[in-house]
Amino acid sequence: DVDWDEVKAAAVAKSKDLIIAGTKKTVLDKLVAFRDEIGDFGVLMLTGHDMDGLKDTWLNSFTVMAEEVGPALTRYMDDRRGTSAAAE
């Protein structure tokens, strides 16, 4: 028999390792830590839930990612590549 409460609890716990969410500073900090752990990456997939009635919130989230967090992450990765190249 499957203990679905246990399965759900394990899935929620694992999601904390796989999902990055929060304020723009929190998201950027987590993405920087992820980059530092695995190295540069070229594609970042952004998803959203069905936010019926919250279209403005959804659009703001994607806009902040595109206009603030994404460019800051790109600058960080560019700076790290420059540092790595200079060290070699």
Image (spheres, rainbow, N blue to C red):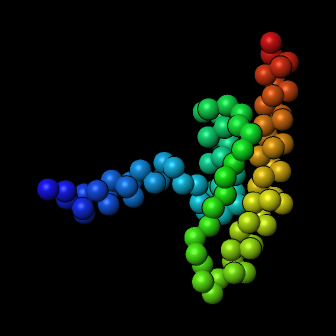
Residue 29 visible here: no
List the single residue furthest toward the left. Answer: 1
Coordinates of residue 83 in the picture (x, y in percent): 82, 25
- Can you say whether 76 is above or below 70 in the image? above
Q: Is residue 25 left or right of residue 63?
A: left
Given the current orientation, which residue lies at the most extreme top position? 88
In this rendering, the answer to whether 65 lies above or below 76 is: below
Q: Identify the residue at image location x=63%, y=41%.
A: 33
Q: Residue at x 72, y 34 (%)?
A: 40
Residue 47 % position (x, y): 63, 61
Residue name at image x 67 percent, y 57 percent: 46
Q: Is residue 21 left or right of residue 80?
A: left
Q: Quadrant of residue 2?
A: bottom left
Q: Is residue 36 visible?
A: yes
Quadrant in the rendering for residue 69: bottom right
Looking at the image, residue 60 lies above or below residue 13: below
Picture mark count: 0
Image spot of residue 75 (x, y percent): 84, 42
Rendered location of residue 21, percent (x, y) = 59, 60
Q: Quadrant of the C terminus?
A: top right
* Rendered image quadrant of residue 35: top right
Q: Residue at x 24, y 62 (%)?
A: 4
The answer to whether residue 49 is left or right of residue 55 is: left
Q: Nearer the viewer, residue 88 or 14?
A: 14
For the view shown, which residue lies furthest in the front direction? 1
Which is more toward the observer, 75 or 1? 1
Front-lying residue, 66 or 82:
66
- Quarter of the image for the N terminus: give it: bottom left
Above or below residue 58? Residue 32 is: above
